[in-house]
Amino acid sequence: MVTQLIYMSRPFGYDSATLASILATARRNNPQHGITGALICRQDIYLQLLEGPADAIGKLYEGILADNRHMDVTLLNRAEVDDRMFPDWAMLHDPAHSWHWSPDDVNAGAIGNASVQELQNVFRQAGTGASTK
């Protein structure tokens, strides 16, 4: 069993350098803590799935809550799961190509109102066809 956590936030100061820094840090640090996952992002939203040992996920999420690059961090789901969705990815990045929510949908609360299964399906779609780690 591993902990799977899904959260959303609004980026503060979103640009390609900020995103590159987030991804580089995650890809460097996550393997040391047994964490895998995926980040889906665009200028108006971060949606992230993290999976790994409960204590490591908890510490990472506390860091995200304190990180000034994230505003309005909202926990969408935290559960124990049998299998990782992204066992081979320190951090998959999908720049919202696989999303089906428009900015208007996001502003209207679509992500917060989505079921866990809907959220997981968005991440599964992001992982389909991904070819680099």
Image (cartoon, grey):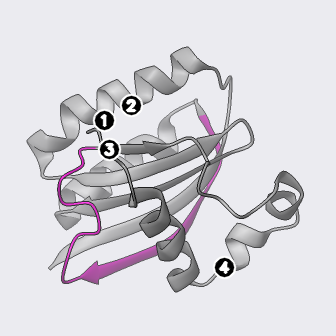
Q: Quadrant of the N terminus?
A: bottom left
Q: Which residue is mark 2?
A: 23
Q: Which residues are magenta?
A: 70-90
Q: The disc labelled 1 sits on which kind of residue?
A: Ala
Magenta stretch: residue 88 in it? yes
**C-beta proximity under 8 Å, tags 3 and 1:** yes
Comes first in the chain, label 1 or label 4 = 1
Q: Is residue 126 left or right of residue 73?
A: left
Real-space CA distance between mark 1 and mark 4, rounded to the nearest whole angstrom:
26 Å
Residue 26, numbered label = 1
- Asked if labels 1 and 2 touch by Cβ distance under 8 angstroms, the answer is yes
Mark 2 residue type: Leu
As drawn, is 13 to the left or to the right of 128? right
Up/down of 83 relative to 11, above or below? below
Spatial separation of the CA atoms under disc 3 and disc 1: 6 Å
Earlier sequence position, callout 4 versus callout 2 = 2
Q: Which residue is mark 4?
A: 114
